[in-house]
DNA sequence: TGTTTTTTACTCAAATTTGAGTAAAATAGC
DNA sequence: GCTATTTTACTCAAATTTGAGTAAAAAACA
């Protein structure tokens, strides 16, 4: 999925070897947002070479004996096309912002509310810390980063602020125990669902 | 990942066969938020049966000849523990709200700004439509749904509202062409990154 | 009543991701 | 100068996801 986009995007800047791609992702703190496992990256690089999206620009021999050489890759013309396809494909993707709490919420009433409150509080604290970090980073880099990268940071900040407000509401209902309540009116809901079908 | 949580969560309500799980996910419109492929669901069900998280409650013979029977599954005690582990595991997950534009933004300057503007506009429209839909659904169901499920809907609504405001900013920069600008000061950025390391 | 479409209910190979290694070289600490 | 840790640079098997089928039964339509 987006690991190829990340790799090709970085190769648009300049030639790199796979480990350098991995490093750059870490250096720019993208790994917090995008979770790229080493294995996926090397797999994607292999695929892209096979598909002719990238090619060896230079092979650096490594002193060690039975160790593989480093290959510096360059993006090809075909790769640039593929990059744009992936870029636009990503822009065309339509699923809305997703929070890790989402899959848990429909079932949260089966859990312990006190424990839920603890988790919510921890998330809230992490979220607030992130907000401060993002503000500082944006302040620091806004004159140097390209607009797109800046919008990414601003997006993370704004979504985090929304997250904070929303988490406070969730936390309040966890602390009051309201999250443990079962459906107020299962019959009414069933009725609704039936009406929905017809 | 969360497909097991969804399946077990639904089996907490009542016994179901796999296709019924799939159906319920659709009926409640969760498939829009959670993307569960058929294959993953059946795979997860197999795994969970092997692991003793669920067991056959009833096998309904199917008239067809060489067709497999339907198995209705029931969650076991071990399954209930696993369910709670998955629930709390999900609540403990820490990556922040994610938007499909995120992986594209750092590289958006390599794309065509007019095309980018089109994509942004389409997302904005989808987002605004979603906001209205969510408002209506919340209005309709707020008295019937359990609190957790309601917080999910409210979360989607709030994140969508933030998304709308943010997309407007992105769109403005796409339309003005600012998104196509390269890094304003690559040297300054390099300088920053170096300082960052030390 | 016969035909077409949709729904029910899966299966499976191929693609991809994950998580856990491996092992040399560089660096840090004493 | 020696040892311990960290970093560089991957590899690989096993787990999981994906996408594309399959085929009967039910519903819709003419």
Image: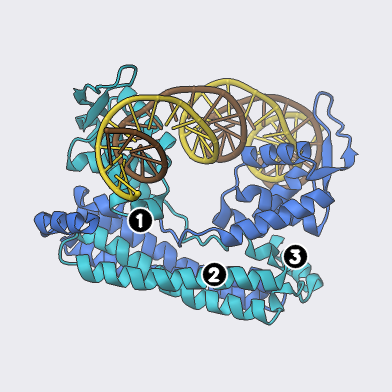
Chain colours: A cyan, B blue, C yellow, D brown
Subunit of label 3: A
Quadrant where the image shows the C terminus of chain B: bottom left
Closest to the observer, A154 or B41: A154
Label 3: element kind: helix
Question: Which mark, by number, is residue B102?
Answer: 1
Marker disc for residue A128: none
Of marks 3 and 1, the one in the foreground: 3
According to the picture, the residue beneath numbered tag 2 turns out to be A122
Sequence-wise, the earlier of marks 2 and 3 is 3
- Relative to B163, A75 lies left or right: left
Residue B41, above or below B189: above
Q: Which residue is mark 3?
A: A110
Give left or right: position of C10 versus B171: right
Residue A58, percent across and down?
18, 25
The residue depicted at 59 percent of the width and 68 percent of the height is A119
Residue D29 locus on image (x, y percent): 67, 45
Q: Secondary structure at mark 2?
A: helix
* Residue B180 visible in this rendered orientation of the protein: no
A43 lies left or right of D19: left
Looking at the image, residue B168 lies above or below residue B18: below
Dot 3 and dot 1 residues touching (CB under 8 Å): no
- Tell me residue B53's x, y (percent): 78, 45
């Amino acid at each position: 999925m987006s690991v190829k986009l990340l790799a090709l995007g970085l190769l648009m800047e300049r030639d790199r070897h796979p480990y350098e791609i991995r490093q750059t992702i870490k250096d720019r703190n993208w790994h917090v947002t995008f979770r790229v496992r080493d294995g996926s990256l090397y797999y994607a690089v292999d695929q892209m070479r096979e598909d002719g999206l990238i090619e060896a620009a230079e092979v650096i021999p490594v002193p060690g004996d039975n160790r593989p050489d480093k290959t510096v890759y360059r993006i090809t013309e075909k790769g640039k096309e593929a990059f744009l396809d992936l870029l636009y494909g990503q822009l065309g993707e339509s699923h809305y912002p997703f929070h890790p709490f989402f899959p848990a919420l429909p079932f949260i009433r089966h859990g312990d509310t006190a424990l839920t409150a603890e988790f919510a509080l921890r998330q809230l604290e992490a979220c607030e810390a992130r907000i401060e970090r993002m503000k500082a980073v944006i302040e620091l880099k806004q004159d140097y980063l390209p607009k797109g990268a800046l919008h990414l940071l601003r997006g993370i900040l704004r979504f985090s602020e929304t997250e904070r407000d929303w988490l406070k509401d969730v936390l309040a209902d966890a602390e009051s125990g309201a999250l443990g309540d079962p459906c107020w009116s299962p019959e009414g809901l069933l009725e609704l669902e039936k009406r929905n079908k017809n």
